[in-house]
Image (cartoon, rainbow, N blue to C red):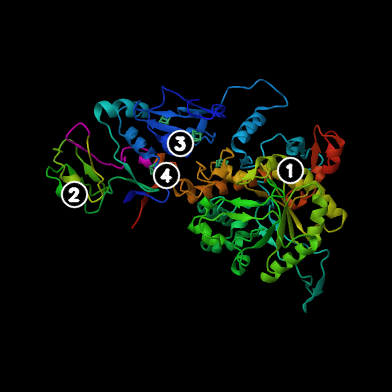
Amino acid sequence: MLFQPINRNYHDFSIVRDKDLCINCKVCVRQCSYEAHYWDETRKKVMHDNSKCVGCHRCEALCPTAALLIQKKRSDFKDNALWRPEFIKYIYKQADTGGVLLTGMGSPVNIPIYWDKLLLDASQVTNPSIDPLREPMELKTFLGSKPSKLEFSKTKDGSPKLKTKLAPQIELNYPLMFSAMSFGSINFNLHIAMARAATELGICYNTGEGGLHKSLYKYGKNTIVQVASGRFGVHRDFLNAGAGIEIKVGQGAKPGIGGHLPGEKINEMVSETRMVPLGSDAISPAPHHDIYSIEDLHQLIFALKEASEYRVPVSVKIAAVHNVAAIASGIVRAGADIVAIDGVRGGTGAAPGMIRDNVGIPIELALAAVDQRLRDEGIRNRASVVAAGGMRCSADVVKAIALGADACYIATSALLAVGCTLCAKCYTGKCPWGIATNDARLAKRQNPDVAAKKMVNLVHAWGHEIEEMLGGMGLNSIESLRGNRDKLRAVGLMDTEMDILGVKHAGR
Amino acid sequence: MKRVYPNKDFCIGCHICELACLTAHSKSKDLILAYTVERNEEGLSSCKHVHEGGPTCVALSCRHCDEPSCVAACISGALQKDPESGRTIYDREKCVGCWSCLMACPFGAIARHPLENKIVKCDLCHDRPGGPACVAACPNMALKQEERS
Ligand code: SF4
Ligand code: SF4
Ligand code: SF4
Ligand code: SF4
């Protein structure tokens, strides 16, 4: 521990270099943005400093001889069910710094994951399953307010004509969208990749709260523009650039907390797009200071509808918190066309760890509660419900739709598709995978051609799987699954949980 | 003809293309042996070199020019333009190590062999079944082999 703080050696990872394989080519040295690997001129070989490793696996992935192993450090504190190692290390860190513990990505803590406790149904004997490779299968999804009833008139030749005026809709080829990740928190290469991928897939991506770079306006048909408490990059053209507008009230990873994009991440392009000075911190207040009530929200929703001439649906995104069902009801009554709910496991570029790991509720419970409440109040048709926050695979999406979601937002999975390894150090701005960084040396690690292709592949793959699962249940359209909780059964859940989820136990 | 084009916007400076080139032109075709043994003992070296300036990197090698200055400069006829494939080809036997080509190449894409009076130059991996090794190895699609007018 020479010349180091006393707890420096309690690091999380060990870098193991296989001497037989390592050729000292320095690829790892160049890849590690935390400078954990270095060239030792005296010893004439590549060396490393374990304490600097954040466990992002970039070096391991790129080492041409597969000589590297990134392992959890094997040193253990004495077993203690209460004082688990993370808490011990938090205290050491805070005793040194006196600061809030920052982190990134979604919560890794062991909050129950209800997706794992829900199982899907399939057809046997009494109803035939459908082979999606032979028969048409509809995944098309429309987000927006649906009318309570349809009225028709007759044209001259006697054929019926729709009299009811339909509210604007967002049309999606898959029940999926790329969730809000602001330009600034992730770099331009990924924004353009998301925009291109969403366009190719016929879905939408969300700009996040950082505005929309002018070169991306051409992807507007597949863009949802976001208005958050900092109002960064919001102006008339921005509001009219997309297929929908989203008011971000909260985020699953940090309900009740604002945002802070450090000045180092505000380069020229980000500054121009966000409309903030170069190098200055961009701070999003915790609340919208013009929304202190449902009535205020109503005003903002309609201000945005006015500004966009009622051409696009307006979504309101909230974090899943205790009273989420009542809040969602208020949001729908305030005139929102879409309610997006972000569960406790949703990701972030930066959040205080205590908030991320302790505030909010799981999306499964929140989603079921919201869907049920809106149904009970007879207003479910007035808004679409979008679920967000930790959808890991197509089965999670299918279960979310059966619980009542119209579509799901995915973000962490989209970042995983382009290489993210969930090291959770996004807030440092040094993402070795070139994702959560605007450093030109790192950002170019995301080639938009490669990234867009991977995102497209991911959604295609999930689409195929969703079709398979639907077909297995004897359904030929995603519409028939929406809120169809009879297609779900629980395993190992308590009565209260099943009651909230509105599902029976397996075997019933 | 299909040439290898670098994309400086997305070259991440990893130098993996150099390692791929080295391996493809080694006897062992084994990266570890090529880098640790053949490189030291036989002067095996990469035809491709990654250049860096600030945050920008670019991997350069012979452009296989339509009118190659190196061919015009070569005093022994070791460098020729192959009319069929369009490649600028190098005959190691004929090369006398005068370095005229090195000075003539406007891209600095020819290097001296570290041990012998010979040059090192890209041959587009013409006998490699998968095409150029650097293109196949680049982790960020910063090298592309394609026809451009
Ligand atoms: S990248 Fe692999 S082979 Fe190269 S120096 Fe690092 S550990 Fe050794
Ligand atoms: S921080 Fe990432 S790149 Fe650096 S040593 Fe650790 S795993 Fe490798
Ligand atoms: S985005 Fe980058 S920094 Fe953040 S978790 Fe993924 S790899 Fe780590
Ligand atoms: S392998 Fe590709 S990214 Fe790496 S240095 Fe070569 S051209 Fe650049």
Query: Is disc 1 on the same chain as disc 4?
Result: no
Cα–Cα span, label 2 and label 3: 40 Å
Residue A469, by quadrant, is top right
Compared across the picture, whether A408 is left or right of A324 comes to left
Crowdedness of circle 1 by 10 Å Cα count: few (<14), some, many (20+)? many
Residue A145, by quadrant, is bottom right
Question: Disc 3: which chain?
Answer: A
For the point 29% across and 40% down, the residue is B47
Determine the residue located farthest toward the left in the rendered image. B75
Q: Nearer the viewer, mark 4 or mark 3?
A: 3
Tell me the kind of residue under disc 4.
Answer: Ile
Q: Position of residue A208 (x, y in %)?
A: 62, 55
Tell me the kind of residue under disc 2.
Answer: Ala
CB of mark 3 near ligand 2 (< 8 Å): yes
CB of mark 4 near ligand 4 (< 8 Å): yes
Which numbered circle lies on residue B12? 4
State the predominant SS element of the stretch in magenta: loop
Tell me the kind of residue under disc 1.
Answer: Val
Q: Which residue is mark 1?
A: A359
Question: Disc 2: which chain?
Answer: B
